Image: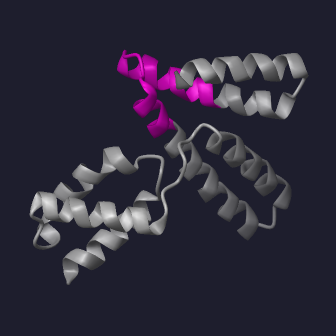
Amino acid sequence: MLKARLQADMKAAMKAGDKPRLGVIRLINAAIKQREVDERIELDDTQVLVVLDKMLKQRRDSVAQYQDAGREDLAAQERFEIQVCQEYMPAALSEDEIATLIATAIADTGAAGMKDMGKVMAALKPKLQGRADMAAVSATIKAKLAG
């Protein structure tokens, strides 16, 4: 479904002559195709979201590095790519929703300390992938498990 939407949007961008957007959609499709070829599988929507999430993380890191280097032109291009990639991501969860999911996962897994961090993250990752910053989620879980 998500791959079909990307293909349709790519055709629309071609017809409209929107070269910047077309370039970003082609980057997304190339990343998806690369993963499919490397792993010899057909990606479903969940796996496509993982690819998009990774691309977003890379772009955010690049923006910070370009700003530190004083290259606002390159940072602006990365921000545009982030904007286009985010159009294909599911709606982000609120802080309250994330906190509720974390509390539920801790209760469901019976996590008692830091040694159970992996169990909690494994339970949450499918629910939160692409909908929350996993680094922030990890920090919140650590804080709760540490006491």
Residue 77 location in percent, x, y? 79, 48
Image coordinates of residue 132 in percent, x first then y, are 46, 56
Is residue 6 or residue 60 the one in the foreground?
6
Viewer-proximal residue among 46 and 72: 46
Q: Is residue 77 visible?
A: yes
Residue 104's place in the image compared with 17, above or below, is below
- Answer left or right for 57 relative to 47: right
Give the magenta part as a residue range: 28-51
Q: Residue at x 80, y 54 (%)?
A: 76
Q: Is 76 left, or right, of 141 in this rendering?
A: right
Q: Image point 90% across, 23% down: which residue?
A: 17
Q: Quadrant of residue 121?
A: bottom left
The percent coordinates of residue 79 (x first, y second) are 73, 52
Which sits in the foreground, 45 or 104?
104
Residue 92 image point, x, y percent: 53, 53
Main secondary structure of the magenta stretch:
helix
Q: Does the magenta-highlighted stretch encompass residue 29?
A: yes
What residue sits 48% from the left and 57% below the top?
93
Which residue: 54% across, 39% down?
Answer: 52
Vertical comparison of 127 with 6: above or below: below
